[in-house]
Amino acid sequence: MKNVIGSRYYHKDYVNTIINGKKILVKFDAYSDLMEPKFGPGYLPYSNKLKLLLNQNKTWIAYKNKWFRLIYKDGESTYLLKPIVEYVKAKKAEEGYGGNQPAKFVTKEKYYI
C-alpha cells in the first residue's frame, strides 16, 4: 500500500473531539468506514447513540454500523454525507503506448435524506 496514490482517510490530519469527557484525536478511515483514534487500541465502536463533534464544528454520527457527517437537521428531515473511499488496482498499459496506471484511492461522496 506504500505506492498507492491518494489516501484512505477523509481527514488529512487527526482532529479534536471529546468522548466521555476526554479530549482525543480521531480521523475517519473512509475506506474501512471506521473512526480511528490517534492513541489507544482499536477503533471507535459503532453506536446509534454516539455523536462526535469534530474540530468543534462538524458533527459525525454512527448509524446502522456506518459513520455519516451530519449536514443539516430540520424537524423530520436529516441530511447526511457519506464519504466513501474506493481502492482502484494498478493497471498495466494494454498496448505499450499508454503508461501504466498506479493503484489509487478514489474518494466519492453520497448524500442521504
Image (cartoon, grey):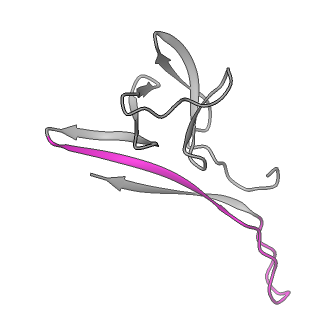
| Residue pictured at 23% horizontal, 38% vertical | 73
Image height of 91 relative to 29, above or below: below
Q: Nearer the viewer, residue 56 or 25?
A: 25
The question of residue 24 being in magenta is answered with: no
| Residue pictured at 39% horizontal, 35% vertical | 61
Which span of residues is magenta-colored? 76-102
Q: Residue furthest right?
A: 96
Q: Residue furthest left?
A: 75
| Occupied quadrant, residue 63 | top left
User: In the displayed structure, does residue 57 sit left or right of residue 89?
Assistant: left
The percent position of residue 112, horizontal first and vertical second, equals 32, 53
Q: Nearer the viewer, residue 28 or 65?
A: 65
User: In the displayed structure, does residue 7 sit left or right of residue 90?
Assistant: left
| Residue pictured at 48% horizontal, 50% vertical | 83
The percent position of residue 93, horizontal first and vertical second, equals 81, 81
| Occupied quadrant, residue 68 | top left
The percent position of residue 87, horizontal first and vertical second, equals 66, 60
The question of residue 98 being in magenta is answered with: yes
The percent position of residue 1, horizontal first and vertical second, equals 79, 52
